[in-house]
Image (cartoon, rainbow, N blue to C red):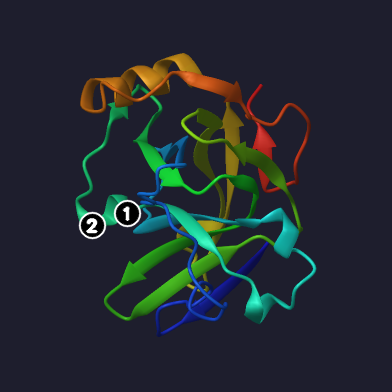
């Protein structure tokens, strides 16, 4: 994990060749469900889970089209759920058919003096397939924090990490109320093996 403190908005997507759609309207569209949130101790402005087509892995990074599943709790986004330990949203995206992978993330913390960004140091891949007319569930990603202290001895977040859990039934129930015609997930693509130190499976 590395920490990057900068005074401008990160441009991971902008630096790539284009943006992959999450609101695709073609007749062959498939649907992706993902939960994103964090434990109550997180003080985060926005989360982004970046995905790309698996076929584009070999391309130079600056030429790879990239998309993002995003949640901005620091900008008054409405939560879909809240438990005693965490809260978050359940997103539904419409995408062209294909083979994809979640390969990176960004945790953004804004402040009056600038912004702090956390991104993974270790590479990882969470593959999923989008099929015409079908729904795929890719897991629920809850951010947790590892704390340290700053130069003033104050407690601050040294690094975040995501715990991925399978909440397919509950997450589908959330989105079914607002999207009653959404097909139930045909595939559960929640990863079943360890992904990376900063992207872990919930126990």
Q: Is residue 81 above or below residue 100?
A: above
* Count of all numbered marks drawn on residues in the image: 2
Return the residue nearer the eye: 9 or 16.
16
127 left or right, relative to 177: right
- Which residue is denoted by mark 1 in the rendering? 72
Query: Residue at coordinates 38% horizontally, 57% vertically from top-left?
Result: 46
Label 2 with label 1: CB-CB less than 8 Å: yes
Q: Which residue is drawn at 69% across and 31% down?
A: 191
**Residue 119, picture quadrant:** bottom right
Q: In this view, does 135 lie to the left or right of 127?
A: left
Q: Is residue 40 above or below residue 116?
A: above
Image quadrant where residue 131 sits: top right
Q: What element carries label 1?
A: loop
Quadrant in which the C terminus is drawn? top right
Around disc 1, counting alpha carbons within 10 Å, would you say few (fewer than 14), some (14 to 19), or many (20 or more)? many
Mark 2 = which residue? Answer: 75
Q: Is residue 145 visible?
A: yes
Q: Image point 52% across, 38% down: which residue?
A: 141
| Quadrant that contains the N terminus | bottom right
Rendering coords of residue 200 (x, y %): 68, 37
Whether residue 41 appears in this view of the structure is no
Q: Is residue 61 above or below residue 53?
A: below
Which mark is drawn over residue 35?
Answer: none
SS at mark 2?
helix
List x then y, in percent, for residue 171: 40, 23
Rendered image quadrant of residue 94? top left
């Amino acid at each position: 994990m590395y920490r990057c403190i900068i005074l401008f908005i990160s441009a991971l997507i902008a630096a790539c060749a284009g943006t992959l759609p999450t609101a695709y309207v073609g007749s062959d569209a498939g649907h992706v469900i993902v939960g994103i949130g964090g434990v109550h101790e997180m003080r985060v402005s926005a989360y982004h889970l970046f995905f790309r087509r698996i076929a584009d892995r070999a391309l130079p990074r600056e030429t790879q089209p990239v998309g993002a599943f995003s949640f901005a709790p620091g900008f008054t986004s409405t939560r879909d759920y809240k438990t005693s330990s965490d809260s978050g949203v359940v997103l539904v995206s419409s995408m062209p058919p294909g083979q994809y992978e979640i390969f990176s993330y960004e945790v953004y913390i804004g402040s009056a003096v600038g912004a702090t960004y956390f991104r993974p140091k270790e590479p990882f891949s969470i593959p999923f397939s989008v099929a015409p007319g079908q729904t795929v569930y890719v897991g629920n990603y809850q951010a947790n924090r590892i704390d340290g202290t700053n130069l003033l001895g104050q407690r601050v977040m040294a690094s975040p990490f995501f715990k991925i859990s399978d909440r397919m039934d509950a997450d589908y129930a959330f989105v079914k109320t607002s999207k009653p015609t959404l097909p139930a997930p045909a595939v559960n693509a929640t990863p079943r093996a360890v992904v990376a130190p900063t992207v872990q499976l919930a126990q």
